[in-house]
Amino acid sequence: MNFNRRTFLKGIALTTAGSLLPGCEREVHRLVPYLLPDDEIVPGVANWYASVCRECDAGCGIIVRVMEGRAKKIEGNPSHPLNGGKLCARGQAGLQNLYNPDRLRSPLRREGPRGEGRFTAITWEEGMSLWVKHLRDNRKHVAMISAPISGTLAEVVAGFLERIAGRLLLYDPSGQAAVSRANRHTFGLDHLPFYDLANADYLLSFGAPFLEHWLSPVFFGRAFGHFRQGRPGVRGRFIQVEPRLSLTAASADRWIPVRPGTEGLVALGIALVMLREGWTRGDIHRRKLVPWLNAYRVEDIAAASDVAQDDLTTMAREFSHAAAPLAIGGGMASAHTNGSRTLAAINALNLLAGNLDKPGGLRVAEPPAFPTTTASPPSATERDLVELAAQFKAGRYTVLQLYRSNPLFTVPASTGIRTMFEQAPFIVSFSSFLDESTAMADLILPDHSPLESWGDSPQIGLIPEQAVGLAQPVVDPLYDTRSVGDVFLHAAHQLDEHGDHALPGVEFVDLLRSNWKTFLGKGATADGSEAAWVRALQAGGSWTTPAKRASFPRQDLGPPYRSAGFAGDANEYPFYFYPFPSLSLSRGEGANLPWLQELPDTLTTAVWGSWVELNPATADRLGLKSGELVRVTSPHGHVEAPLVVSPGIRPDLVAVPMGQGHDVYGRYAARRGVNPVAILAPMFDEDSGVLAAAATRVRIEGTGKPGKLVLMEQIQDGRDAELLTIRKIRKA
Amino acid sequence: MSPRVKGVLIVLATAGLACLFGFLYSTGSSDLRSQDIQPLDFSHEMHAGHLKIECMFCHRHAAESTTAGIPTVSLCMGCHQSIEPATPDMGRLAGYWRDQKPIEWVRLQRLPDFVYFTHAMHLKAGLQCGDCHGRVATMRQTPRAPSFEMGWCLSCHSQRGASRDCWTCHK
C-alpha cells in the first residue's frame, strides 16, 4: 500500500471521527427494581447453592454463586469427598453451557432433507405428540444412545426403555469400558477400585493421563499433591510410561517413551524381572503367573518395546522395594486392540507387589446403596454402536434417541456409523446443542442446562467414601426447555394406555425426592425426615465413610497378553498415529465453550486450533518446519494442520489432539481445526470393544503452505536440546 | 482563498474539534446531569419529609447488602392502591402495576467498579443515610449526591478513625 501524506491525513481524520463517536451515545444507567419482592433474593448479596458438576462423568461437588437469580461463578464443594473444594477448568466453564448463545431454546422439527440443518421451532405439545406417536408405532424398535447417566435419571430412562422393550446404550467415549473390563477380570469388580495414590510412595503409570482428563483429574490432582508434598520426609516417586510426553508425563520423575501398543509388554517385562529376582510378595500369584509369562523373555520385551533392560530392572526394583507401590494404566495405553489385556497385565503388577487392600495400593470402593429400581446397563463402546448401526440397517430398530452423545464425532467414519444416521427412519435428540449427531435428528426436545435441573449422582467407585451427590437447579430455566427426566416421565404417562402406572405420572423432582427419602432413611444415620432432605440439599449430597472396608472379591490374572495390531501397511504408512484427548476440550465436548478454547494447551501453548506434533529429528529428516501446514494421511483419509515440533514425542509418532474439527456445534466450535478421529481405522479393543484410537498408521507430508495456529509462547522446539532418536531410546 | 486563510481555518477547525473532544471526555462523554430525568416525578420531600417514612422502609436492603435496594413496584402499591391518584404521575404508577411492568429508574448514585463499597458496613458503623446522601427529605427532586470522590471518602474515614488502607476499598 502506498502510504503518502494524503493517506496519513485521511487516517487521522477517520481516527478523530471514530474517537468522537462515544460522545454521540446517550449512556443512561438504569435501576430496575423487581415488580414483586423475592424473599430469597437480597440484591447485592450472593446465594451459594450446592450441586453436582456434570461437565464430565466424574461427578464433582460444586457450589454455585448466584446473584439476583443469575449464576455467576462455580467453585468446588469443599465438603464433597471426591474433589474436596477443587474444580477443573471444564467445571469452571460450566457457566458457559448455561449462557451459551448457541443453546437450543425450544423444541425443533426438521425442515428439508436430513442433515441440512434446517429446523423450525415448534411447541412442546407438538414435539411431545410427534415423539409419542413414533414411540407408539415403533414399540420394541427404539434404541437410545446416551452419555453415562446414573441415579434417578438412569432409573427413569432405563425404566422407560425397558417398558417399551427398547435398548439403552450408555456410551462413554473416554474408553473407560476397557478399564472396567480389566478390573472385572482381575478383581471381579464391576466398578472402579479406589486408587490410593495419596498414600503411595511409588507410582508406575502406563499412559494414564490422570492429571488431565482420566476418570477424575480433580481427585487425582489432589491425591498427587499429597503423594508428592503432603507427607513430611516422603516424596513419592513417579514414572510415566507412554509414547508422547503428556502433561502428566511432564510432571513425572521419569518419562519412558515406550513403543505404542507395547505398554502391557513392559508391565510383563517388569513382572518377569520381579519373578526372576524373587522380588514378589504373595506366593499364589507367583504360581499363577509363571505359566502366563512362559512365552516371554526380558530381552525380547526390551527390543519390542524400546525400553532398555536396565530400565526394566530399575523399575522392577524400585516398584517391588517401595513401601507402597501402585501401578495404574489407562488413557491411550488402552486405546489399542489389546487394551484390556494391557490393563490386565498392569493389574498383575499390583498383584505381584501385594498392594491390594493396603494403604497406598488398590482398595475396594464400595458404591453407596442408592435405591434405584432399574439397573442401568454397563457402558457401551464404539463397537456396540457399530453393531447397532448394522441392526438399524437390518430394520431391527427404527427409532434412534440421542442424549448428550455425539457418535458422528467420536466414532470414526470408517466404521460406517453414518449409515445409522442416514437410514434410521426417525431420530429424536434431547441435546442442548446442535452437534453433528443432533443435526441429523428429525425432532429435538432440548434438555435444561445442568445448572437448571435436578439430578443425583451416586459415586460408583474411585473414592473410599460412599457418596451420592445431589444436583439442584440454581437458576430458573432461561429458555423453553424441559428436563429430560420430566420429558420421559410425561411420555411414559402418555403411552400408558392401559393405566398400569409402572412409572408414576409424577414430576421428576418428586421421584428424586422419594428416592432420597428412602436413601436417607436407611443405614446407620437413618433420618428420612424433611430436615434431612434439606440438609442434603444444603450439603450437595450425602456421604459416609463405611465402618469396614470390603476386600476384593477375586484376585486373578485374566486372559493372557496379546500383542497389538495396527491398521495400515508399515512401508506406506511409516508412522504410528496418536490422537490424544485434549486437556480442556476432552473428546470434543468442550469445544463450544470459549473459555476452554482459549485455555492454552499446557505443553505447546496452542489455543483455538489443532496442530500436528512431530519429533525434531523426524521433522528435520522430512524437511518440515514448525508452523508449516502438513498433511497426515491414513488408509481412511487425511487431515491438514500446522506442525508443532516438540522433543516430547517419539520419532516414529505423529500426534494430533482430539476435540476440534466440528462441522457444527455452535459458533465457537464449528469449522475450527481438525478431528483426528475422522481418519482412524475401524479397530477396537478385542475384549471390551473400545475404539483402538492409537491403532492406525499414517504418513506425513508437507503442503508448502503456512499453517495458522496461535501459540501463546514460542515453545522450545528441542533443536538445542539433545534429540531423542529411536537408536538412543534403544541404547539408553 | 489564500493559503494563509486556509491555514488559519484548518488550525481553527482542529482546535474546535479538540475542544469538543476534550469537553465530551471531561464530562464523562455522556454522563450528563441533564439525563437525570426519572420516569415518574417521585418526591423524596413528600415521602421522607412530609410523610416521615423511614429510608429503610423502601431501601430495605441497606443494612444487609452492598446495595441499598430500590423498592419493588408492589411495595409502592402497598400504600398507593388505597390512595386516590392526585397527580398524573400517581396515575402512571398505577399503570405500571396494572401492566405488571417494572419502573426503570435512572441511577443517580454511582461508584466506579474499582471501588468496593457496602451500605451494610457503613450503617453498622453508625452513619445515617443523610450523612452521605444529603437532606433528601427536603428535596422536591432528588439530585445526584456529592461526587463520591476518594478525598471525600478519606476525609470522613480519617475523622472517624476508620481504615485508610488501600485494600479496604480497592480489592
Image: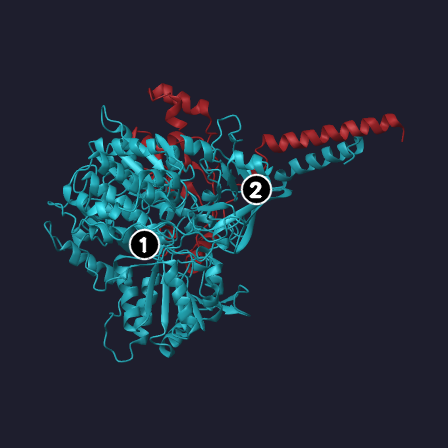
What color is chain A drawn in? Answer: cyan
Asked if marks 1 and 2 fall on the same chain, the answer is yes
- The label number, if any, that marks residue A642 in the structure image: 2
| Residue at figure coordinates x 22%, y 34% from the top left | A277
On screen, residue A260 versus residue A12, left or right, reads left
Q: Secondary structure at mark 1?
A: helix
Circle 1 crowding by C-alpha within 10 Å: few under 14, some 14–19, many from 20? many
Q: Which chain is red?
A: B
List x then y, in percent, for residue A484.
35, 62
Q: Amino acid at mark 2?
A: Pro
Farthest residue, direction bottom? A498
Residue placed most toward the observer, A517 or A335: A335
Label 2 resides on the chain identified as A
Residue placed most toward the observer, A78 or B71: A78
Reply above or below: A379 against B36. below
Q: Amino acid at mark 1?
A: Ala
On screen, residue A452 versus residue A619, left or right, reads left
List x then y, in percent, for residue A290.
22, 45
- The label number, if any, that marks residue A177 in the structure image: 1
Label 1 resides on the chain identified as A
